């Protein structure tokens, strides 16, 4: 038996929920599955990919987390098309780069940030 099978949720601290929610839903295309708000300091929004899998929960209740400190890797089948689409939606993305995993790996990727400054990578698989 394997102790850990998969990731089911990642929680990210955010400072401005409306901006973060708009970025992840409208710019990246994730679907909002839950939006629970007690007040501005206790607000959780859960998003998922259209095909399912792990969820991302944005939270203004930070506990020990700080907005802008996450590094998240997303995957895509066509990084050049994703670069064009994100740029068209006003996201500041890097040029397409090679060798994510070191010289010779040939893995193409782009980098960009969410509204809080968390580092996001979109990797072609």
Image (cartoon, rainbow, N blue to C red):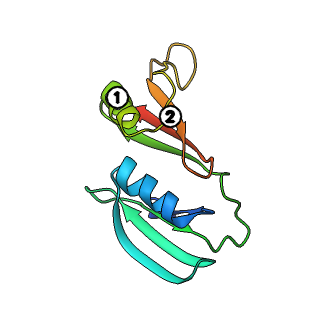
Q: Earlier in the sequence, mark 1 or mark 2?
A: 1
Q: How crowded is mark 1: few (under 14 residues within 10 Å), some or many (20 or more)?
A: few
Q: Which residue is drawn at 38% across and 29% down?
A: 83
Mark 2 residue element: loop
Query: Which of the two residues, 120 or 60, is positioned nearer the viewer here?
Result: 60
Return the residue nearer the eye: 109 or 16.
Answer: 16
Which residue carries the number 2 mark? 92
The N terminus: image quadrant: bottom left
As measured in the structure, the alpha-carbon distance from the residue carrying label 1 to the one carrying label 2 is 11 Å
Residue ID at (32%, 56%): 49
Out of 9 and 21, give the one closest to the viewer: 21
Q: Which residue lies furthest to the top in this view?
A: 104
Seen in the picture, residue 18 relative to 111 is either above or below; the reply is below
Work out whether residue 37 can be spotted: yes
Vertical comparison of 86 with 64: above or below: above
Camera-nearest residue between 94 and 125:
94
The mark found on residue 100 in the picture is none
Q: Which residue matches tag 1? A: 84
For the question of whether residue 1 can be seen, the reply is no
From the top left corner, tell me how far across and down residue 23 is, in percent.
45, 53
Q: Position of residue 22 (x, y in %)?
A: 43, 58
Q: Which residue is drawn at 56% across and 50% down?
A: 115
Q: Quadrant of residue 119?
A: top right
Q: Is residue 87 left or right of residue 97?
A: left
Sort mark 2 into few (<14), some (14-19) or many (20+) by Cα contacts within 10 Å: some
């Amino acid at each position: 038996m394997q102790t850990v099978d998969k990731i089911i949720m990642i929680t990210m601290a955010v400072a401005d929920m409306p901006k973060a929610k708009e970025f992840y839903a409208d710019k990246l295309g994730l679907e909002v599955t839950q939006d629970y708000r007690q007040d501005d300091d206790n607000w959780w929004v859960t998003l998922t990919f259209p095909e399912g899998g792990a969820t991302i929960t944005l939270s203004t209740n930070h506990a020990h987390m700080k907005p802008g400190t996450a590094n998240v890797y997303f995957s895509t089948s066509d990084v050049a098309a994703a670069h064009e689409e994100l740029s068209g939606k006003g996201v500041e993305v890097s040029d397409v780069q090679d060798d994510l995993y070191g010289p010779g790996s040939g893995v193409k990727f782009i980098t960009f940030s969410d509204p809080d400054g968390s580092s996001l990578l979109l990797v072609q698989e």
